Image (cartoon, rainbow, N blue to C red):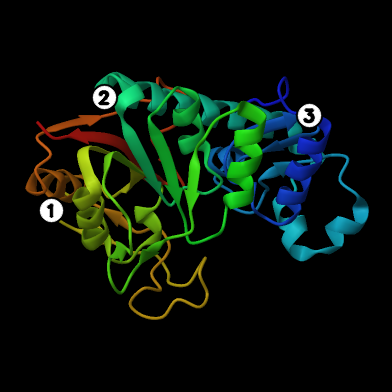
Amino acid sequence: MNLKSKIKKHQLEEARCLVIKGLINYQPYIFADDLQTGVGFEFLSQKEGVGLVYWPTIPKELLRSPEMKRFIIDNSDADDFIKANERLRLAYNSFIDQICFRIGDIHNTTFADIGCNSGYFPISLSLRGAKEAVGYDRQDYSKCFNLFNGILGTNAIFSPLYYGGVTHSVSGCKTYDVVLSMMVLCHLSDTLQHLSFLGSIAKKAIFIWTLVADDEDYTIRFGEPNKYYKNDKFPFCFDNMVRPSLKLLYKSLELMGFTNIYEVADNGQFPEVFYNVRNKAIIALRN
């Protein structure tokens, strides 16, 4: 999302503050020529830790923080970083295009993004005229939503409710026409229960982008536990590289009543394999 032409000086300062707080880094935004974010470079280089933020003018004292230093790329990687995140933006926008194509009239459609991060998808859908676009996350991204709504004149909503592994649900979550899940399943140990929850709140369709295993059977593979969420206890500690087989994912969607299932291409902008693992984007619709 390129915000350079719309962002005001005070909003750019707010964006910098949110970057410093670690609230904006993962999703691909261009705030200014010297402030850009996104995980695309890490995905394409297959080197986790090379950085999520291009900020060549960052005050040096901020780099004394190990957390901040981890996010800032080496300036010599700037060109590759910018190109990779442009590809990620094009992929994201292609996903949104195809969701809108399959759904039809989004002006009368409600959307929820479960595990929304800083809000790229709810903001984008609101910008396109969605009736309602809501993001849920365990981290409080309300200030990010406020910033983007202010820049773009959108009305996306952040909800502080989040998915609980014990209950396999978001307490108080209502139903929506379309539910999105963007690289969330790969961080959850209760894959089938989470899919069931998504299905229970989706009246018309689910869009899922996730890692998948190549197994021919109904399987789920897990990576090492507690990579990202150090305090999560067993069995919810398996938060890394969780991937159902594509066969299991399809069968699960069918069993929940989604009769029309489509693999969504991103128009070749992003590879189907990164970190040596396949990823798939799927939209599943009810009749």
At label 2, the amino acid type is: Ile
Secondary structure under badge 2? Answer: helix
From the image, tell me which residue sits under label 3. 8
Which residue is located at x 91 percent, y 53 percent?
60
Q: Which one is closest to the eye, mark 1 or mark 2?
A: 2
Report the residue marked by disc 1: 217
Left or right: 79, with 185 as reference point: right
Q: Nearer the viewer, mark 2 or mark 3?
A: 3
Q: Is residue 102 above or below residue 57?
A: above
The disc labelled 1 sits on which kind of residue? Answer: Asp
Q: Residue at x 60, y 32 (%)?
A: 85
Name the element at disc 1.
Answer: loop
Residue 189: which disc? Answer: none
Give the vertical position of 176 relative to 109 (above or below).
below
**Residue found at x 40% / y 19%:** 267
Q: Nearer the viewer, residue 122 or 97?
A: 122
Q: Is residue 270 visible?
A: no
Which of marks 2 and 1 precedes in the sequence? 2
Q: Which residue is mark 2?
A: 103
The reply to whether discs 1 and 2 touch (Cβ–Cβ < 8 Å) is no
The Cα atoms of the two marked residues, 1 and 2, are separated by 31 Å
| Residue 56 horizontal/vertical position (percent) | 84, 39
Give the mark, 3 or 1, whose residue is nearer the N terminus.
3
On the question of residue 176 being in view, the answer is yes
- The amino acid sitting under disc 3 is Lys
Alpha carbon of mark 3 to alpha carbon of mark 1: how far? 53 Å
Depicted 12 relative to depicted 232: above or below? above
Please provide percent x and percent y for residue 170: 34, 61
Q: As drawn, is 125 to the left or to the right of 77?
A: left
